Amino acid sequence: MLEQREKLTQDERLANIRAMCLAVENGDVSKVNAEGQKLVDELKQEKAAEDFVVKHGLLDARKEDVEDETDFLETEKKDDFDVDESITNMEIISPLMREVKGG
């Protein structure tokens, strides 16, 4: 396929693009390959989901949803200053160094 593309002139490539655009405009999408059809189907599903949400709105939160989320409240663990410097402001003195300095 690559060799064929290299042999086409710029005018031939533009003619192919023009033909594809006209085919799409005329609704002739029967020439779409399997990968293209998969993409078209995914886009149709996304559009249907979007239309549903716009028309009906989001579902209300259920009691089970709220209970599930409350399980995660206050579960944030305190960062270990001395272990992970990527999540710590390294401009300040660590708790360990404060102990060493006596303060």
Image (cartoon, rainbow, N blue to C red):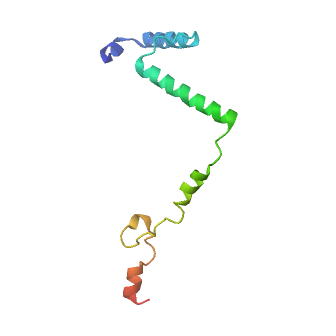
Q: Quadrant of the N terminus?
A: top left
**95 above or below 9?**
below
Q: 46 and 4: which one is in front?
A: 46
Q: Residue furthest front?
A: 63
**Left or right placement of residue 12 versus residue 55 in this view:** left
- Residue drawn at the location 43% of the way across and 65% of the way down: 87
Q: Residue at image x 64%, y 42%?
A: 59
Q: Where on the picture, by quarter, is residue 3?
A: top left
Asked whether 37 or 85 is in front, the reply is 37
Say left or right for 83 vs 27. Answer: left
Q: How many marks?
A: 0
Q: Nearer the viewer, residue 33 or 41?
A: 41
Q: How far from the left and from the top, in percent, is residue 100?
A: 36, 86
> Considering only vertical position in the picture, is 28 above or below 69?
above
The location of residue 53, given as percent across then percent down, is 64, 36
Residue that protrudes farthest toward the bottom in the picture? 102
How far across and down, in percent of the image, does residue 99 sit?
39, 86
Against 54, is 1 above or below?
Answer: above
Residue projecting furthest to the left? 3
Answer with the quarter of the image where residue 11 lies.
top left
> Quadrant of the image for the C terminus?
bottom left
Residue 2 in the image: x percent, y percent?
32, 18
